[in-house]
């Protein structure tokens, strides 16, 4: 009987020890999970803040670019309106000014280092809002389309428009009037070369028309990207406030 009592006590003791060990493990797991969650929440906050600052920087750069791009497109359109056989009635200085503005090929130089890092590391998954994550994942493909259109415009200008201009218009004279290094360049030595003749050039008109068409498409893409950035910033602000 005494042996049975001892065995029962040992059994109860062993069960008690096991229960204590299990409780200890559960408490340790709970603390570990709490600590992991806390670390992830902190990382989510820091990532959201960094993404917000990067995003706002891109918004500012893109707004400035769009404003400048409006001037470029306006100059492009005015040049088309000047085209015609009666080029001698056109103001040469106005033409030079429009050429200086309209022949630029601007590009959007974004800063996406934080977003790229977040996507490649998988840390974007730490963000709470699925809507926000979808917006952020959609930015790189849109940037690629913007860069592709910018490249197309530059190639169009380099391969088609620029050769026409070089044959019919004095770039040196335009730079002498408008560039920051005009004093170094000096005026064109070809005084009798009337740059207005380019306004009677059918190929130049075609090139301007194609350029304006492409620029319209790129401007729509710029505005689409700007809307995307703004909506993303709003969602990031909410994420930071959580």
Image (tube, helix red, strand yellow):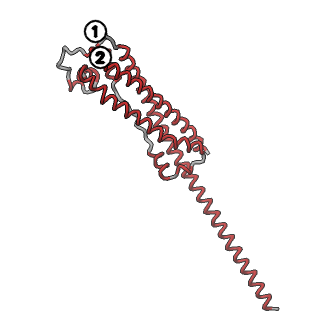
Q: Residue 201 — which label?
A: 2
The residue positioned 45% from the left and 28% from the top of the image is: 217
Binning the other alpha carbons within 10 Å of mark 2 as few (below 14), some (14 to 19) or many (20 upward) gives some
Classify 10 Å Cα crowding around label 1: few (below 14), some (14-19), many (20 and above).
Answer: some
Regarding mark 2 in the picture, which secondary structure is present there?
loop
Q: Residue furthest right?
A: 1
Location of the N terminus (image quadrant): bottom right
* Quadrant of residue 6 within the rendered picture: bottom right
Check if mark 2's residue and mark 1's residue have beta carbons within 8 Å: no
Above or below, comparing residue 171 to residue 115 in the picture: above
**Residue where numbered disc 1 is placed:** 88
- Say if 193 sits above or below 61 in the image: above
Q: Using the image as rendered, state which of residue 78 and residue 157 is in the foreground.
A: 157
Estimate the spatial distance between the alpha carbons at disc 2 and disc 1, rounded to whole Å.
13 Å
Q: Which of marks 2 and 1 is nearer the N terminus?
A: 1
Front residue of 220/113: it is: 220
Give residue 233's position: percent from left, percent from top: 54, 38
Residue 69's spot in the image, x, y percent?
41, 26
Tell me the quarter of the picture where residue 239 sits.
top right
Q: Which label was assigned to residue 229?
A: none
Q: Quadrant of the C terminus?
A: top right
Of tags 2 and 1, the one toward the viewer is 2
The residue positioned 37% from the left and 17% from the top of the image is 80
Residue appearing at x 33%, y 25% in the figure: 103
Q: In this view, does 209 lie to the left or right of 11?
A: left
- The x, y position of residue 46, in whole percent, is 53, 49
Q: In the picture, residue 81 is in which quadrant?
A: top left
């Amino acid at each position: 009987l005494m042996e049975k009592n001892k065995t029962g006590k040992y059994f109860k003791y062993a069960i008690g020890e096991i229960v204590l060990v299990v409780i200890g493990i559960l408490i340790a797991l709970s603390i570990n999970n709490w600590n992991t969650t806390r670390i992830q929440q902190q990382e989510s906050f820091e990532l959201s803040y960094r993404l917000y600052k990067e995003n706002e920087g891109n918004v500012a750069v893109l707004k400035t670019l769009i404003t400048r791009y409006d001037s470029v497109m306006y100059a492009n359109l005015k040049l088309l309106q000047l085209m015609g056989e009666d080029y001698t009635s056109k103001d040469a200085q106005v033409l030079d000014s429009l050429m200086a503005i309209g022949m630029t090929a601007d590009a959007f130089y974004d800063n996406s280092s934080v977003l790229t890092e977040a996507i490649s590391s998988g840390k974007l998954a730490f963000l709470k809002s699925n809507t926000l994550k979808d917006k952020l994942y959609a930015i790189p493909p849109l940037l690629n389309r913007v860069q592709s259109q910018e490249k197309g415009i530059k190639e169009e200008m380099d391969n088609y428009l620029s050769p026409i201009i070089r044959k019919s218009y004095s770039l040196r004279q335009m730079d002498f009037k408008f560039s920051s290094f005009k004093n170094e360049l000096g005026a064109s030595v070809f005084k009798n070369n009337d740059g207005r003749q380019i306004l009677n050039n059918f190929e130049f008109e075609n090139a301007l028309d194609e350029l304006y068409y492409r620029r319209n498409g790129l401007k729509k893409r710029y505005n689409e990207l700007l809307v995307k950035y703004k909506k993303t910033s709003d969602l990031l602000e909410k994420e930071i406030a959580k």
